[in-house]
Amino acid sequence: MATNRREKTSKLVAEFCKGNDRAFSELYDLYVHALYNYGLKITSDQELVKDCIHDVFVKVYKKRHEQLSINNFSSYLLISLKNRLLDEFRRQAFSSDNDIQDYTSKRCTSDVEMDFITDEHHYLQNKQVETLMSHLTRRQRQAITLYYLEERKYDEICDIMQMNYHSVRNLMHRGMLKLRAAAM
């Protein structure tokens, strides 16, 4: 399948270089979705990705009179899109619509001590959960994890654990009793 796509791409590029605009349109249709998905892995700004894809294809279109000597057209497009996005990130980092006065009046509002206390609190909660879960059997841990952390329904838990509904309910009940006893 990949070789068919490569062959089709090679034929379309050759036709495009000869001046066939329909071949360019087919190249665009063939790669635009893959480029869009790739761009969204780099940034979540959909409009920026669309603009950069447009820029990449404009660049390819302008080079049509030069003989495109690209061995792997899809890689060329992906790399061009990545470079175009990085250029745009650099441009955005060095330019701003805000005046310098807006930056000088702002202070750091982050409280390092509160951040540390919050992190420590989360760490202690996680350790307490680990300790409590260690009192459960492997199957009880699995059922409680599926129900409370993964938010699965009892029917799904039954399928995953290959148990009937009442057995899962009993397992959950005994597990919760153990957790309550261990917490006291």
Image (spheres, rainbow, N blue to C red):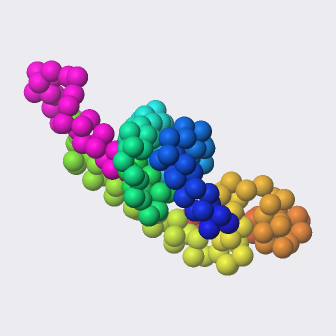
Instruction: Confirm whether residue 149 shows in the render.
Output: no
Quadrant location of the C terminus in the rendered image: bottom right
Q: Which residue shows up at 54% across the image and 37% down it?
A: 21
The answer to whether 137 is drawn above or below residue 153 in the figure is below
Residue 94 sits inside the magenta stretch: yes
Residues 130 and 25: in front is 25
What is the span of residues highlighted in magenta in the rendered image?
82-108
Residue most extreme to the front: 18
Label the magenta part by its dominant secondary structure: helix
Q: Position of residue 104 (x, y in %)?
A: 10, 27
Residue 114 in the image, given as x and y percentages of width and height: 27, 46
Residue 92 falls in image quadrant? top left
In this rendering, does residue 102 appear at all?
yes
As for residue 92 lying within the magenta part, the answer is yes
Residue placed furthest toward the bottom: 137
Asked if residue 63 lies left or right of residue 17, the reply is left
Q: Is residue 21 above or below residue 77?
A: above
Taking the image as shown, residue 41 lies to the left or right of residue 105, namely right
**Residue in the picture at 89% in, 69% down:** 164
Q: Nearer the viewer, residue 100 or 91?
A: 91
Give me the residue at 46% from left, 32% from top. Answer: 47
Residue 84, image x, y percentages: 34, 45
Q: Is residue 146 left or right of residue 71?
A: right
Considering depth in this image, is 131 or 160 the residue closer to the camera?
160
What residue is drawn where x is 65% and y is 64%?
A: 4
